[in-house]
């Protein structure tokens, strides 16, 4: 039953496009899910894709464009004129329509909005354009089903029939009072099972959980995940029902956050994928590598200061990788644990001082074990006692400092509104490498003088 | 409207538990969402939590236990006897019931199943126990609403009323033929809007997308995300409808996968959080740190072999951090891009040879820029020409090798069924560090001899 996205079909479709075999295109794509068509069209160049979707039904066309990858879509929209984009926007839910409008130049966006024939949709879109896309308001759609608490069940079902034309998926019916304030919810199931003599006020549930427009998308995701919601109503500060957020958008947000975190942690500055161009891949990676190289060069100059010590005891150099690798590992572990807490905030958090004390306790324990281990290794393999003591002492200090830095850095980044994952990225790692090297050579210097 | 999880309330509740103030507990928790009660009880010790939930309605009690953190719940279940657990399992959907049964000792599990009063539920649970929890079969619930294609709309609504007792959320009605094979779907909305004279076969849609029992949870998540599903039906190889997977379970899986990846990448071996004990935190971190220390120690011994060269030109040591940091950064970037592709597989993938050629091209470009940069730095700061050439050549080689290793390692890990994120973790990173050091000293050796 599932449409087969095969290489063979892709080639046959390319052939059909090249030869303007419209019949083949229309027949084989008839009834295919728009998400599958989008996956397919992401592989074609813009002109060929446009040729294909121009042959399809306008409603399907709108859905396909809505499902396209963001960068494919941007190229795509440039190939359409204003009336065509207006038609697409007309078919979409308000939240998807706003996403597309935000990708257009300001002038074209205004023209599209002015060209909409549905006044309610125009008002909805103008309302949604006000919100940034990283808060609940920017994620919500205006389309939802609501019922006044004073309605009868019959009137309610009648109104739902009318409203349902604009709403693809219902989930819950939100119950509002005469001031449009959200006061409860009714499930469609309960409505169907209710007898007709009853009224909305007899069957609605008052324990409705809503999010407010200014809440961050991360908070919205946490609420929906905690309560297993498919949709959550959005209210303003007065409690007035403004829209709803559906789980499909939140799933995308969760996945994007995870991908962004991975990119930041590994030092990739743009949303690149394996099939992007060599140029794009290089551009996304080189800046972070240069930071590392500059850090390495500063390390080299720094060590130059201690050349006298190095000439006296060459073996000092042997332990540089050990010190740096351990410092790096401890720092990334510590940041990762903080990221975990920031991603799943506890309702009852400890004070910062208590948290840091605990971090340092864990670090002291780890540092002690590692220092003893290295001392043991050194003794077994016939290392010099004084150097062994220096290395173990420096290692212990590096573990403590790296734990502290690894914990405090993501917290500071987060409090200034930066992504805390940056603490595990190359920039902070480079600084920590330098710090570790500094501690090691300072320890060497102290012991030798 | 949302229950306020405050520290004050937690303290008042603790006080009420200590003084057996049952009235306060029952009154303040009345009507509170079970997810909120679970969040609260995760903070209490097992005896106190049990005291609280024993006061609540059995159905609410089952939901609260279902919502608890896994480790809190395990402690919890040990405090209940078999009849109490049987009562809890009776109230849960089959998928949640199986999750709890899997946490019990085998003997107790068998007793609970034998004690279930509902034969259909017993059969459902026995069926689900067969599946591993990382495939579609292990994620599905048996509860769903289905309609035979030959039914009238009236009969269909009648049957839904009957079936709906066991199904909390409906989403879609799945349409089956007389052999129970899944052949389509009808939305509840469409059913309500249909006139009573029609039959299911007149209004159902045939383009239903299903997953098969053996599909991995990652694949299920990809399907649901791609098609914006709230629920997806699960069929066996013959196409027979067996159950459905709801989005709430998939959202949890997506979040867990992201968290697991972060833990593996940063070298944390267990699912620890900041509020776990010092002992647990140390145990989760120390093994990975020891790997790094052993690697560092091997580096030290390796450099010992080149002591003669180091004594001749001490400045060789200065560039160890630069070589290692760059190798590490390049390796992690490369692995991250492969992880991205594995997480979002393209329908049309390139051959491995082409992919590797592209990786090496990007690496050569990056390596060239970095090598020239380091050479330039060295010249400006009055470095020795021969050493500068050695460092730049070694750096170029390290970038190439690290790119290759960073790309091939996650692919190999994945093909052997390991988590490909291990490629960015401390173990592989330690091996790559050694490799980088080896390349550097081999280059030094070549030039000097």
Image: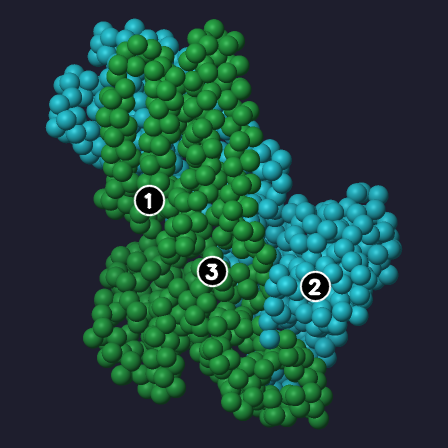
Chain colours: A cyan, B green
B206, A354: nearer the viewer: B206
Q: Quadrant of residue A434?
A: top left
**Circle 1 — which element?**
loop
Relative image position of residue A189 (x, y in whole percent): 57, 79
Callout 2–callout 1 Cβ contact below 8 Å: no
**What chain letter is assigned to the residue under label 3?**
B
Relative image position of residue B57 (x, y in whole percent): 37, 74
Which residue shows up at 45% across the image and 14% down it? B388
To which residue does mark 1 refer? B268
Q: Nearer the viewer, mark 3 or mark 2?
A: 2
Image quadrant occupied by the N terminus of chain A:
bottom right
To which residue does mark 3 refer? B218
**Circle 3 — which element?**
helix
Q: Nearer the viewer, mark 2 or mark 1?
A: 2
Residue A92 visible to an observer of this rendering: no
- Pointer 3 and pointer 2 on the same chain: no
A59, A336: nearer the viewer: A59
Callout 3–callout 2 Cβ contact below 8 Å: no
Which residue shows up at 31% across the image and 65% down it? B52
Relative image position of residue A200 (x, y in whole percent): 63, 77
**Circle 2 — which element?**
helix
Which residue shows up at 24% across the image and 29% down it? B297
């Amino acid at each position: 039953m599932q449409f087969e996205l095969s290489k063979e079909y892709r080639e046959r479709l390319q052939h059909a496009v090249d030869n303007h075999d419209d019949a083949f295109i229309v027949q084989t794509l008839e009834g295919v899910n728009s998400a599958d068509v989008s996956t397919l069209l992401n592989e074609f160049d813009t002109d060929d894709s446009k040729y294909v979707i121009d042959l399809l039904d306008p409603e399907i066309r709108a859905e396909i464009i809505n499902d396209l990858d963001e960068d494919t879509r941007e190229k795509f929209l440039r190939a359409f004129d204003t009336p065509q984009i207006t038609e697409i926007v007309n078919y979409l839910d308000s939240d998807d329509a706003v996403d597309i409008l935000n990708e257009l130049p300001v002038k074209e966006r205004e023209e599209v909005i002015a060209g909409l024939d549905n006044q309610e949709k125009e008002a909805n879109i103008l309302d949604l354009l006000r919100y940034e896309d990283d808060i609940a308001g920017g994620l919500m759609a205006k389309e939802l089903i609501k019922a006044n608490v004073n309605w009868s069940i019959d009137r309610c079902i009648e109104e739902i029939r009318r409203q349902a034309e604009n709403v693809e998926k219902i989930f819950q019916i939100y119950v509002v009072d005469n001031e449009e304030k959200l006061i409860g919810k009714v499930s469609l199931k309960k409505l169907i099972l209710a007898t007709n003599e009853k009224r909305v006020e007899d069957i609605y549930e008052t324990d409705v959980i809503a999010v407010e427009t200014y809440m961050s998308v991360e908070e919205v995701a946490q609420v929906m995940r905690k309560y297993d919601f498919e949709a959550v109503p959005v209210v303003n500060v007065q409690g007035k029902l403004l829209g709803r957020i559906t789980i499909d958008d939140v799933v995308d947000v969760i996945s994007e956050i995870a991908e962004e975190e991975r990119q930041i942690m590994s030092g990739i500055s743009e949303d690149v994928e394996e099939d992007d161009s060599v140029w794009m891949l290089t551009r996304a990676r080189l800046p972070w590598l240069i930071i590392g190289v500059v850090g390495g060069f500063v390390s080299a100059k720094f060590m130059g200061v201690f050349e006298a010590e190095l000439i006296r005891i060459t073996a000092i150099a042997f332990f540089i990788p050990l010190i740096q690798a351990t410092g790096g590992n401890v720092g990334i572990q510590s940041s990762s644990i903080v990221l975990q807490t920031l991603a799943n905030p506890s309702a009852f958090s400890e004070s910062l001082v208590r948290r840091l004390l605990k971090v340092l306790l864990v670090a002291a324990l780890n540092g002690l074990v590692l220092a003893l281990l290295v001392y043991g290794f050194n003794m077994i393999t016939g290392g010099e006692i004084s150097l062994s003591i220096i290395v173990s002492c420096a290692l212990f200090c590096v573990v403590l400092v790296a734990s502290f830095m690894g914990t405090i850095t993501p917290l500071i980044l987060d409090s200034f509104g930066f992504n805390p994952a940056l603490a595990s990225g190359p920039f902070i790692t480079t600084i920590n490498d330098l710090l570790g090297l500094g501690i090691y050579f300072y320890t060497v210097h102290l012991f030798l003088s």
